[in-house]
């Protein structure tokens, strides 16, 4: 990549984040509601993701699937901007003059892990608000007197009741999820992209743009699936930590997961896998294709 790209890397990432939320948020709502309800002794238990989706659409319509999307758009735009921007620039710095020799795990993994760890500090409060908004509405076990009127109301009420520490509830779990998950995501993305371009290098130049989009869809989609297969149990723990009404409940993700495992086995640790995987491919494919198109339009050179 060109050294002079500067802010353009971050702008391209921001655009990718908006595309991700637009496509992926409804699936995320279903995932969060299943994680909350199907690990709790209270309220309804959903048979599967289609059952959950049907109940939301029947009682709230499409609007219900986009509950909490405002904070998600803001958080994801900033998070994606920093993630792609920092990853690109750190990768370039670590590669030095060795660009163009294929994926290098000693470059990809630290770049992705560092970027993921940094963005967790932005994602944690925005996801706490998003999750608390998402569990309201259909089949909610949250009393009406304790429901939030808007994402801003949720954020302000949380800070008022629990202090600044409260808005960062689940921060350690978010850091683990993002550090590990993005290392997996970018590793899969870089290797799939490299080997697909290697196989298609003899294709006609007339089809180059179409090939780039196809490679972006495949590499981004597979990277997204790999991300969630690796860290979904941490995400289950994070949802429980961030949506609990008990201030004194455990914030240790490993304690929570061991409790779920004793009660429901490995399946319990992967609650919400269906909508997560269905969301992962199109949302991450959209993010990568949007990012790569934005990079081209902004005139950033890539290896």
Image (cartoon, grey):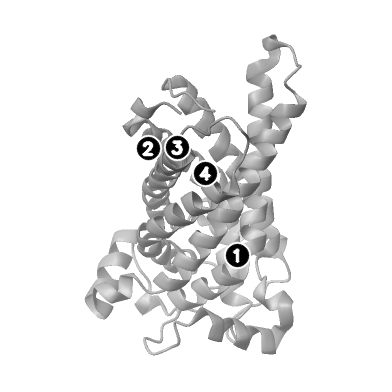
Badge 3: few (under 14), some or many (20 or more) residues near its Cα, within 10 Å? many
On the image, numbered disc 4 is attached to which residue?
20
Labels 1 and 4 touching (C-beta < 8 A): no
Residue 216 vs 206, above or below: the answer is: below
Calculate the distance from the C-alpha at mark 2 to the C-alpha at mark 4.
15 Å
Viewer-nearest of discs 2 and 3: 3
On the image, numbered disc 1 is attached to which residue?
231
On the image, numbered disc 2 is attached to which residue?
10
Instruction: Tell me if I can see residue 136 in this picture.
Output: no
Q: Is residue 116 left or right of residue 204?
A: left
287 or 298: which is nearer to us? 298
Query: What secondary structure is found at the residue carrying circle 3?
Result: helix
In percent of width and height, residue 156 lies at 25, 67
116 or 48: which is nearer to us? 116
Please tell me which of labels 1 and 4 falls first in the chain: 4
Viewer-nearest of discs 1 and 3: 3
Identify the residue at image location x=31%, y=75%.
Answer: 166
């Amino acid at each position: 990549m060109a050294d002079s790209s500067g802010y353009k890397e971050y702008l391209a990432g921001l655009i990718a984040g908006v595309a991700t939320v637009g496509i992926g948020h409804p699936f995320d709502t279903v995932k969060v509601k299943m994680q909350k309800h199907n690990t709790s002794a209270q309220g309804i238990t959903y048979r599967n993701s289609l059952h959950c989706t049907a109940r939301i659409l029947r009682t709230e319509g499409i609007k219900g699937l986009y509950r909490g999307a405002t904070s998600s758009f803001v958080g994801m735009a900033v998070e994606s901007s920093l993630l792609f921007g920092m990853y690109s620039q750190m990768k370039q710095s670590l590669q030095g003059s060795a660009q163009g020799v294929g994926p290098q795990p000693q470059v990809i993994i630290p770049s992705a892990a560092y970027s993921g760890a940094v963005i967790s500090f932005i994602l944690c409060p925005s996801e706490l608000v998003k999750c608390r908004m998402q569990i309201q509405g259909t089949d909610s076990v949250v009393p009406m007197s304790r429901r939030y009127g808007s994402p801003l109301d949720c954020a302000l009420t949380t800070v008022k009741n629990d202090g600044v520490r409260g808005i960062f509830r689940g921060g350690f779990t978010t850091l683990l999820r993002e550090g590990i998950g993005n290392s997996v995501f970018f590793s899969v993305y870089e290797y799939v992209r490299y080997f697909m371009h290697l196989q298609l290098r003899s294709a006609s130049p007339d089809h180059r743009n179409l090939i780039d989009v196809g490679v972006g869809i495949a590499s981004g989609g597979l990277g997204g699936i790999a991300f969630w297969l690796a860290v979904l149990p941490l995400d289950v723990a994070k949802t429980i930590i961030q949506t609990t009404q008990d201030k004194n409940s455990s914030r240790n993700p490993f304690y929570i997961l061991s409790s779920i495992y004793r009660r429901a086995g490995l399946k319990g640790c992967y609650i919400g896998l269906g909508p997560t995987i269905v969301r992962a491919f199109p949302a991450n494919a959209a993010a990568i294709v949007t990012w790569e198109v934005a990079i081209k339009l902004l005139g950033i050179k890539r290896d």
